[in-house]
Amino acid sequence: MSPSRPSTTLFEDAIDVPLWLETDRATPFAQRSRRDRDIGSQLARGNPVERVRGWWHVVDRRPSSAAGVHLQRTRMLVTVGMAIVGAVAGSGIALAAFHYDGTRPVNVVTLLAALVLLPLLLLLSTLLLIPGRVPGLRTIQDTLAMFSSGAVAASVYRRLVKVPRDLAPLFGWHHARSAAAARFAKWQLLYWSQAAAVSFFVAAITTGFVLVTFTDLAFGWSTTLAAEPGTIEKLVRSVALPWHRLVPSAVPDLTLIERSQFYRLDGSSTLDSGASRALTGWWPFTILAIVTYGALPRLAVLLLAGARLRAATTALLLEDPRVTALLDRMATPAIETAAAEPEQPFIPTSLRNPVPHDPLVDTARAVIWSASIDSSSADAHARKTLGLKLGKVVEAGGGRSLEDDHAAIETICNGERGAVIVFTRAWEPPVLEFLDFIGALRRALGAAPTIIVNPVAETAAGVGVVQRETWSRAIARLADPHLYLETGAA
Amino acid sequence: MSLPRFAVVGHPNKGKSSIVATLAEDDTVAISPEPGTTIAARTYAMRIDGVTLYELIDTPGFQRAREVLAWLNAHDRGAGARADVVAEFVELHRADTRFHDECELLRPILDGAGILYVVDGSRPYGGEYEAEMEVLRWTGRPRMALINLIATGDHVEEWRSALSQFFSIVRIFDAMRADFARRIELLRAFGAIDESWATQLNKAADALAAERAHRKSRAAEEIGDLLVTVLTATESASLPDAAADPGIEDATRLRLRRAVSDREHSARRTVAEIYHHAGLDAHEAAAAFLTEDLFSQRSFSVFGLSTQQLALTGAASGAVAGGLVDAILGGASLFLGAGIGALIGAAGALVGADRLAKVEVLGTPLGGFELRLGPITDPNFPWVMLGRALLHVHLIAERNHARREALVIDAEAGAHLADAIDPARRRSLDRIFRTLRTDLSIDRVARAQLIDAIAASIETG
């Protein structure tokens, strides 16, 4: 079976599948195994993510939590929010950095410091978070993570969605409960911060370009440091190295550098309109510097964070122990040995404790059923357990034929009077054949004579409680008022 | 090739249902000393992915075997027609309540099932069994006799002599005490009843053996995840100000304990289900040790590491860390690293033994304060959890499905169960527990190590 493309995102599934599997713990294991194996055997083998998502697509999962959709929507909202915040900040800083009121040129040094140097330092701090927790740098990494714009985004996220307790660790690097959750939190934080950063630079570059296009900007450079134009030229060439062949016009030459140096104390009057035209030559350099050292690295980190975030989301799904167990159930042949339905528990009939109320005379007749006692020791046993002497003794049951049983009944009924003791094996259950014999005996004896069923123990330990109860219930089922069970126990 | 089917037949109360429960690993099979517990034939199919490899059929016991035999003898038309006469008996008496049990047990045999005739070798042989065996012989189906041992008596040889007159294969099988290896051995032996069934039965036996090994891994994973969850569990509560509130702290502590206990119970249930003992919960109530409060002093003293082992394990882990320093310094440290590490490790283990869970009051970024309780930092806590889980899985894995009595654990013999774990494995586990306590997570490699160590401990447990 190749299920149609899931309508949910990987992130939604990474949230919802483990949550649902947690509630699914209440389903009996055998049932889960059978269900998951059935679905698993219909899915293509190979990619575990596809198998889990395929399973999720077809499993009957009512009622299902909508946490994944909710979190995904909020996640997108926060990403857009971060992009907007980044764009507003980028535009604002660009407007300030490219500010030119005609009195002094735009200071390239300030502009590059604000839009290239500082972002480069921030990028460096971001890069420190990428390799994971490095021994010796943990405190620095934790501090940087705490103050990252991504951490602010995560905080806003938690505030917006009121994340369930189980999911809260997903959006905090410090609180992650599994390596996969820690990785996810890290890359989500980085993704949000880089989304803001890329947006920042796109807005800054756009703003700069718009200002260059629609306003009259003049660029110069000024610094308190003792910098010779020659030194600045070398610096500028180094900075422009990535594009100097591609866009040679975007590399300011020494003449431009010399002409564009200014000092605030000189005032603006020294710059005539011709000089102003020449000074516009800086703008391609500044825009390309921002693109090359600001936007492109951030874009690269954003792409990396995006790819790693997807991998971390995959891990979040696949490394969850509940999902691991699911994949195991899908892959393992379902072995069933039990009956389809549990057997109804056996309910024994109520127990009757028969108490002999018939007067017993000294002598009784006896039937030894199924060689339960040696005929030579039957009398001694009857004296000991019942206080009765034995008269006529016959044998029935066991390996004897049914005709033998009838003959035994006839023999026992002829002549003597008094109670009839039926010795039987205590350890054998009272099968219907025995009860049939008792019934036939009663019919032959008539209603009045007492019949005593005496289960004989296998050992001197006597008849056990369970054996006595079993025999007692069987005798009770015959509902014979003159039929008693006597085991000789106190 | 026909499907191997086996009708488990015999006198009432001789362990037919116990044998079926053991082989089918089904603890819902009704087993009782009362005769007539099984009132209808019931099929237990062994299936792999829905494909049946063999079937066991539990049947009611013989109630009127001599009467049946008398009827058969009265209608005998010669040896070649005896199976037909049995079929006629069943057909004629199918609505006769007097022979309900006989019809139920003979029907699957007439449908082609092999015969597994069960007797109790702990009780003396009796002549009444001969009628049963003779009736079975009349069916002409392949058959095996199984001598079950319900009580402590020994009449096996007496039985063996009698059974040999009617059965070409006689085996002893103690349904109540048979371990997994014996069960598989018996299953393979069923192939001797009908050679055409041997391949199918061996395939089933191989699959069951593979599944048995897989169960251990699943149980180890469940215990590993239990440990990771409970060792990183925290609870939090909002606080009006930075001052500690004993009432809120107590309530939070109670919640944390309940969460840990609930998770432990859930893991136990899963482990029981993995070993097909889903119905064991009711019996478990009597096992005082496993129901002992997880956080009680008694639980710590029985399941955790002894103070001495705790210190030794802490010292060993510390020494390993210190040893790394020595290795880096090429021995220039005169192995002080290992020594100091051992001392710190041992001291940490002992000092930490009295505290259970870390309590912190934190300011929240958006104002207000939060009480955070946990994770549980007592160094003996993971050992208590592990000791309890190992004992439980051991009892479950070894428990025969025919047994119906409550789990019973020798209380005093079980003291400091975690001490029995192999020292090297204990050190490895200790390092993982430390990582969990400090980082609140472990990576995939450490998780695999944790599960391996647990699986190995289950094996030796």
Image (cartoon, rainbow, N blue to C red):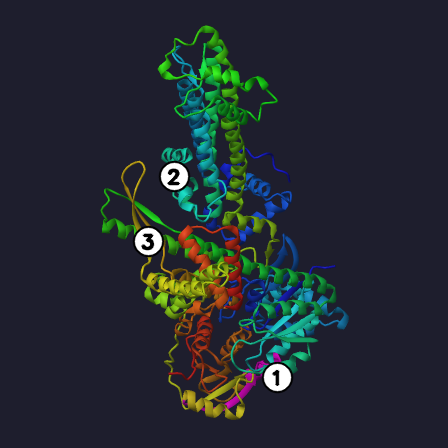
Which stretch did the figure color magenta?
Answer: A387-409
Secondary structure at numbered mark 3: strand
**Residue A100 shows up from this direction:** yes
- Mark 1, Cα crowd under 10 Å, few <14 / some 14-19 / many 20+, is some
Position of residue A489 measured from the top left corner of the image (x, y, whole percent)? 40, 83
The amino acid type found where label 3 is placed reads Lys
Position of residue A224 measured from the top left corner of the image (x, y, whole percent)? 39, 24
Q: Tag 1, which chain?
A: B
1 vs 3, front mark:
3
Instruction: Locate the N terminus of chain A and report the quarter of the image it occupies.
Output: top right
- Mark 3, Cα crowd under 10 Å, few <14 / some 14-19 / many 20+, is few
The amino acid type found where label 2 is placed reads Met
Q: Tag 3, which chain?
A: B
Dot 1 or dot 3: first in sequence order is 1
Q: Tag 2, which chain?
A: A
Position of residue A427 measured from the top left corner of the image (x, y, whole percent)? 51, 79
Mark 1 vs mark 3, CA separation in Å: 68 Å
The residue wearing badge 2 is A146
Instruction: Locate the C terminus of chain A and report the quarter of the image it occupies.
Output: bottom left
Q: Are marks 2 and 3 on the same chain?
A: no
Position of residue B108 measured from the top left corner of the image (x, y, whole percent)? 65, 63
